[in-house]
Image (spheres, rainbow, N blue to C red):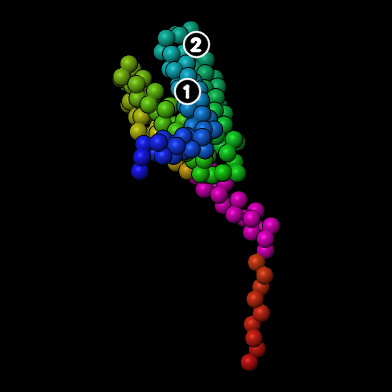
Amino acid sequence: MNARSQLAGIKRFFSLHDTTLRVGILTGLALSGVFLTWLFAANRMPELERFAYARNVVAAAAVLVLMSLPVCRFLISPGQMFVTGILGWALASLCYFLLEIRFPRLENRMGALHLFMLGAIAYGFLSVLAWVVSILRLARRHPVAAARRRGP
């Protein structure tokens, strides 16, 4: 196999999954931004300490909204939904891991691997749910005809 045909295959791979990669990377960057803002607001702004509960609720809501972007974008394609979600969540978990270096007590709360697995399970569950719903919709659209039995 020559190098020219290998490069054509790589170009075709990235053109097919361009939206998946783009949405995953943008979701990961946005989630990382929320994690950074949340952590710095909690540790570097003591005047916000009295609003800690509200700050945490707003940050958690922002994370959930950003996590729903791949789900809403690829609702009819569970495979792409899972890949996009895992890519974005992996980038956010990497950012969290790097933040653990700067803030060592952060790991006591939840480690980066635990955070990654939490997101992976959530995206896996949502992808399977979307897949089952698509199968049910397909079965409803094309009902199976009952076969007649021959009598004795």
Main SS, magenta region, reads: helix
Residue at the disc numbered 2: 48
- Crowd tier of the residue under label 2, counting other residues whose Cα lies within 10 Å: few below 14, some 14–19, many 20 or above: some
Magenta stretch containing residue 133, yes or no? yes
Q: Which residues are magenta?
A: 125-143
Name the secondary structure under disc 2.
Answer: helix
Name the residue: 45% across, 8% down: 45
Count of numbered marks: 2
Q: Measuring from the top left, give residue 38's x and y in whole percent.
A: 47, 18
Mark earlier in primary sequence (2, 1): 1
Crowding at mark 1 (Cα within 10 Å: few <14, some 14-19, many 20+): some
Q: Which label sits on residue 29?
A: 1
* Type of amino acid under label 2: Leu
As drawn, 105 above or below 4: above
Disc 2 from disc 1: Cα separation: 25 Å
Q: Looking at the image, which residue is at 49% across and 32% down?
A: 21
Q: Is residue 129 magenta?
A: yes
Q: Amino acid at mark 1?
A: Leu
Q: Position of residue 137 (x, y in %)?
A: 65, 53
Residue at the spot 42% in from the left edge and 9% down from the top edge? 44
